[in-house]
Each structure stands twice: as C-alpha cells, then as structure tokens.
Amino acid sequence: MTRSIALSYVPTTRLCNTSLSFLRGVLGVRAAPPNVTVLAEAGCYPLHVFAAKMLLKYWNRLVCMEDDRLVKRAFVASAALAGTTQGLSCDLAAPAVVDAEKGASSLQSAYLSSVTDSESSKVQQYLPMRDDVAPETYDMAPYLRAGAGRRQRRCLAQLRAGSYWLAVESGRREGMALPRDQRVCQR
C-alpha cells in the first residue's frame, strides 16, 4: 500500500501567530506588513517547515526501531488507517527511511517560490530589497546582524517591510483610498 507523507502547506495556527507576533515585536513593525515579509526579514521559514522536518526525522526513527517495541507495532498497525495525502511518497506496508533534509528543502523551496510568485503589492514592493530569496542564501537581513540599536533596527525594519507612517503607506487607509501614485508626503 503506497501512501504519502503530507508535506503541503499547513494553515496558520495559534503557535504560528505567536511566533509571528514575537518576530514583529523584535523587528518593531506593526501588523500591516504581510507575514512573508516579516519572516524574510528575520530569515525564518514558517513553523510548518520545521514541523515537517521533525515529522520526517520521527518517521525515520520509527522505521529503524526494533520490531518488538510497542511504538513500532502501533506504527505498523496504524499504517493501514492512513488516508491518501499529497507529498513525499512512501510504501506504508514496508516503511523505509526517507531523506528528511531533502523533504525539508523541497518544502522550503516551495515556500520561497510561493513568496516570489505572490501577487501582493506589499510583497512585490519588498522583493527588490531582498535579492536573495533562494534556499541556499535565505538568511536574516544584514542590518540585523550588524548589532544596530533597537531604534535603528525598528526604523530600518519598518521601512523595508512597509510598516512606516509615510503617505505612500498611510494614504491607503485614510478615508477614500488614494491610488499609489497620488500618495505624496505633505511634510
């Protein structure tokens, strides 16, 4: 019986929201920037990527476990109950070790391609500032490593993530939303 281990996108949970809230606090940005820009500034992947990697490592541990262990017997017995999912294919009748790093990197690549293919205007405005949206070079923004003070870090993060108080950002929320090309700073 060939089934697959689900490695698709997981909807946002409370834990993901808490993680994003923490990152927003560290960066000093409001709720306005999209989650992908906050994660990209910090050089982090969504929590479901880490969860999938841990799941695959646990899978490998179960597969390599001795057959007389209770956990292994429960695993083999419940293999028949598995439903059809999408992701990394494997034979549940004869479970085999999977490459956890390859599975995690494929999920990371899928996430990063969804970021670059995003139609959100804020994400499209952010991407030119972030020219390293590839799994090999995906890391936190350089100014975060430079050890800048909290105020400097906050100002840079707000400017890069689109969470600033200039007219180009605040003009879309005031009364009648102005087109982007008509939002001009008054000061």
Image (spheres, rainbow, N blue to C red):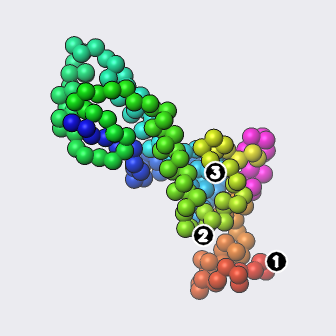
Q: Residue at x 21, y 26 (%)?
A: 76
Using the rendered image of the protein, determine whether residue 19 is visible from the camera's viewpoint: no
Q: CA distance from mark 2 to mark 3?
A: 17 Å
Write down the residue under mark 1: 187
Mark 3 and mark 2 in contact (Cβ < 8 Å)? Answer: no
Please say whether residue 152 is one of the residues in the magenta stretch.
yes
- Above/below status of 165 relative to 76: below
Q: Which numbered tag is attached to residue 92?
A: none
Q: In this image, 59 relative to 83: left or right?
A: right
Q: In the structure shown, which secondary structural element does the residue marked by tag 3 occupy?
A: loop
Q: In the structure shown, which secondary structural element does the residue marked by tag 1 occupy?
A: loop
Q: Position of residue 95 (x, y in %)?
A: 29, 27
Q: Position of residue 170 (x, y in %)?
A: 66, 74
Q: Quadrant of the C terminus?
A: bottom right
Q: Residues within 10 Å of mark 2 (few under 14, many from 20)?
A: few
Give whichever of discs 1 and 2 has the lower sequence position: 2
- Above/below status of 91 relative to 156: above
Q: How many numbered tags mark residues here?
A: 3
Q: Which mark is in front, 1 or 2? A: 2
Q: Residues within 10 Å of mark 3 (few under 14, many from 20)?
A: some
Over which residues does the magenta segment extend?
A: 144-157
Q: Position of residue 98 (x, y in %)?
A: 39, 30
Write down the residue under mark 2: 121
Q: Position of residue 24 (x, y in %)?
A: 60, 52
Write down the residue under mark 3: 133
Please name the amino acid that badge 2 sits on. Ser
Please say whether residue 32 is one of the residues in the magenta stretch.
no
Q: Residue furthest right?
A: 187
| Nearer the observer, 108 or 91 | 91
Please name the amino acid that badge 1 sits on. Arg
Q: Which mark is in front, 2 or 3? A: 3
| Nearer the observer, 182 or 166 | 182
